[in-house]
Amino acid sequence: MNSSSSQASTLKLHKRYTPIVFAFYMAGIMAFLMCCTIVAANSGFNAGYVQRVFSAYALAMPVAFCCVILVRPLVLKLVALTVHLH
């Protein structure tokens, strides 16, 4: 194993953090896409669009992260009721 792959593996989090990391990435991506869409729908693609998107994102991302963390147990139960897991 070379030093770059060894160094990259030491930067990774332990697998027990998987639900939190998943929630972080899911919230970040979804909040950004929703901000882009809602800002465009409300005020269009005009001057200041990107600034308005990032302003909305500054509020939406932490809210989305908390929501994903809170609803995760419910979603897991709904998936278990809906999908054959075995």
Image (cartoon, rainbow, N blue to C red):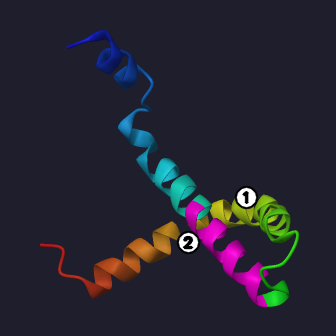
Q: Tell me if residue 69 can be seen.
A: no
Q: In which quarter of the image is residue 51?
A: bottom right
In the rendered structure, the answer to whether residue 66 lies left or right of residue 81 reads right
In the rendered structure, the answer to whether residue 78 lies left or right of residue 38 reads left
- Which residue corresponds to mark 1? 62
Spot occupied by residue 77 in the image (x, y as percentages of width and height): 39, 77
Spot occupied by residue 78 in the image (x, y as percentages of width and height): 39, 82
Query: What residue type is disc 2 on?
Result: Val
Which sits earlier in the primary sequence, circle 2 or circle 1?
1
Magenta residue span:
29-41
In the rendered structure, the answer to whether residue 26 lies left or right of residue 61 reads left
Q: Which residue is drawn at 71% across and 73% down?
A: 35
Q: Label 2, label 1: how many angstroms apart (C-alpha)?
A: 14 Å
Q: Residue 71 carries which label?
A: 2
83 up-or-down from 11: above or below: below
Q: Is mark 2 on a helix, strand or loop?
A: helix
Q: Is mark 1 on a helix, strand or loop?
A: helix
How packed mark 2 is, by other alpha carbons closer than 10 Å (few <14, some 14-19, many 20 or more), is: few
Quadrant where the image shows the C terminus: bottom left
Q: Tell me if residue 62 can be seen.
A: yes
